[in-house]
Image (spheres, rainbow, N blue to C red):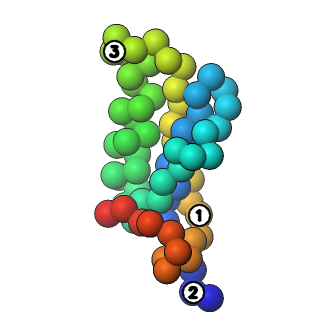
Amino acid sequence: MVKQLVFALIVSVNGEIDAGAKSYWKDLDRCRWFAEELTLQGTRRKYHTPVLAYCVPEYVNPETALIHT
């Protein structure tokens, strides 16, 4: 099985990682953009949900994982 290095967007709400919110990104900059937007919504915008999002490198099977560009 061939694996591809991607960046997984991890989302934590109220200190708990939401496994259903994990997504895979080919480009680290795009992953980081979404992570920043999700994190900022609870600090600088009108939403008060304590959300923390970040990107981690991960190897996935490109035949079974949806990888965003």
Give the alpha-carbon distance from disc 3 to disc 2, as whole Å: 42 Å
- In this rendering, the answer to whether 42 lies above or below 20 is above
The CA distance from mark 2 to mark 1 is 13 Å
Q: Are marks 2 and 1 in contact (CB under 8 Å)?
A: no
Picture quarter with the N terminus: bottom right
The amino acid type, in three-letter code, at marker 1 is Glu
The quadrant of the picture occupied by the C terminus is bottom left
Q: Quadrant of residue 32?
A: top left
Task: Give me the residue at 52% from left, 55% from top.
Answer: 8
- State the residue at coordinates (52%, 44%): 21
The percent coordinates of residue 58 (x first, y second) are 59, 63
Q: Is residue 17 left or right of residue 65?
A: right
Name the amino acid, label 3: Arg
Q: Earlier in the sequence, mark 2 or mark 1?
A: 2
Dot 1: what SS? Answer: strand
Q: Earlier in the sequence, mark 3 or mark 2?
A: 2
- Crowd tier of the residue under label 1, counting other residues whose Cα lies within 10 Å: few below 14, some 14–19, many 20 or above: some
Q: Can residue 55 be spotted in the picture? A: no
Q: Is residue 47 left or right of residue 53?
A: left
| Above-or-below relation of 61 to 25 | below
SS under mark 2: loop
Residue that badge 3 annotates: 45
Task: Name the residue located 52 percent from the left edge and 26 percent from the top edge.
Answer: 51
Task: Identify the residue under disc 2.
Answer: 2
Q: Which mark is residue 16?
A: none
Q: Is residue 36 left or right of residue 9?
A: left
What is the CA distance from the residue labelled 3 to the residue labelled 1?
30 Å
Residue denoted by label 1? 58
